[in-house]
Every structure is written in C-alpha cells, then in structure tokens.
Image (cartoon, grey):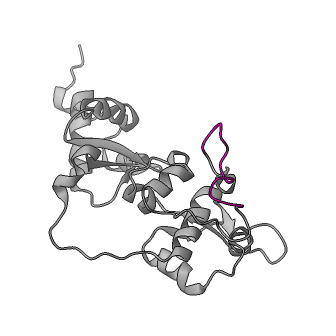
Amino acid sequence: MTETFDPIEKTLFEAPPMGEQERMIEAILFASADPVTLSEFTARMPHGCDPAEGLITLRRRYEGRGVNLVKVGDAYALRTAADLGHLMHKETFEHRKLSRAAIETLAIVAYHQPVTRTEIEEIRGVAVSRGTVDQLMELDWIRFGRRRMTPGRPVTFVVTDHFLDHFGLESARDLPGLKDLRAAGLLDNRPVPGTLRGPNEDEDPATGQSELFED
C-alpha cells in the first residue's frame, strides 16, 4: 500500500519561497520602530527561512528608491533615501546644540572606541565633566562598554547603534574624516588642547585624516 502525504502537512516542514520570505522581512521592518537584528528575524520567521539571503536580495530591490534598506551596526532598518531627507523635515523642531566639550568627547569616543574617561581626558588635555558624558548618554549616542582588564578595571565608552542610525552610518568605520567634520560644522578650526598642533598641522596629507582620529 502506497503511503500518501497531505500537501498542507508537508508545507509545515518546508521553508516558504524566497519571495515570501522577503515579504515577511519587509513587513517586520515596516512594523519595527527600531532596527532589527538577524537573530530577531530568525526568531520571528518560520523554521528553515534564510533571513540573511532575503535581506541581501531585498536590499538590492530598494536601491535607487525613495526608501532604502540599510544596515545599522548588526541590525537592519528601512530609512528614507539620503537625498530625499529634506522632504521629511518638520516645520517645528527643537535644536539641541552640543557644547564644544560634548562634540570633542563624542568624536574621541567614536574614533577611539572603546576608550576610558582617562584616555578621553589625555587626548583633550582637560578633564571631562560628568555633565558632558551624561548628555551624550541621554541622547543615546554613547554607552558603557566592557571594563578594561587593567588595575581598577576602568569602564570604557563606545558609540551606540542609535548614533550610527542618526548619522546614517553602517559602522564606525564609515565615520568621516576631520575635514568632513569641519565642513559640516561639527568641529571648528581650533586645535584640540594638548593634542593637535594647529589647523594645518593635524592632518595626514595622504589621507586627509587627523592624527587624533586614527583607528
């Protein structure tokens, strides 16, 4: 006697077609307020799905469109295309200008992470106030990293995925050089105390990168 299988029962053990998996990924991204990690996709989608492959093909489909699929750290999100961002600006919003100390501290953490408070102070040449660090943590742009395995086990600071998402970066390796920061108004032409010698002496002519911001 030949045994037969119910087609409906059989599909329970087979992964959906890739096109259907892409639809699932798209739906999850649209419904998520925060970027979604690969492990979160795997947990939500049916057994046997390959969200990594689905993300690759879906990312290609969104290239050149008004909305792009971008990678934010170890997670993924749908974001307005960079060249259309001006269309999303609201008429009423609050400006929260960072102090020079906060900008310098943020830049040092971003380019030197993981970095301790002592190391930040050594680079800046001045003490870092608690208020400066608190402001950056309140904005969710920096967070505590792992403690150093050195005497006193000092805590380190690293930038957050929220920081990367805010500035449209996939990882800290995509951070701009010093010239770009100054052009954007995030740094002025004054040297950082105790570190840079002057506005024309702090950049490698071959790379345009500051000695302060080497990896």
Span highlighted in magenta in the image: 197-208
> Can you say whether 151 is above or below 15 in the image?
below
> Can you say whether 129 is above or below 53 in the image?
below
**Residue farthest along the top direction in this orientation:** 1
Q: Residue 128: within the magenta?
A: no
- Identify which residue, 27 or 149, lies in the foreground: 149
Q: Position of residue 38 (x, y in %)?
A: 41, 46
- Identify which residue, 199 or 34, lies in the foreground: 199
What residue lies at 55% left-to-right and 46% top-to-bottom?
173
Q: Position of residue 47 (x, y in %)?
A: 35, 39
Quarter containing the N terminus: top left
Q: Residue 202: within the magenta?
A: yes
The image quarter in which residue 114 lies: bottom right
Q: Position of residue 103 (x, y in %)?
A: 52, 69
User: Can residue 115 be seen here?
Assistant: yes
- Identify which residue, 82 or 125, lies in the foreground: 125
Residue 36 in the figure: left or right of residue 117 = left
- Identify which residue, 152 or 118, lies in the foreground: 118
Q: Main secondary structure of the magenta part?
A: loop
What residue lies at 43% left-to-right and 49% top-to-bottom?
169
User: Can residue 49 be seen here?
Assistant: no
Q: Position of residue 111 (x, y in %)?
A: 61, 56
The image quarter in which residue 17 lies: top left
Q: How many marks?
A: 0
Residue 1 in the figure: left or right of residue 40 = left
> Can you say whether 4 is above or below 24 in the image?
above
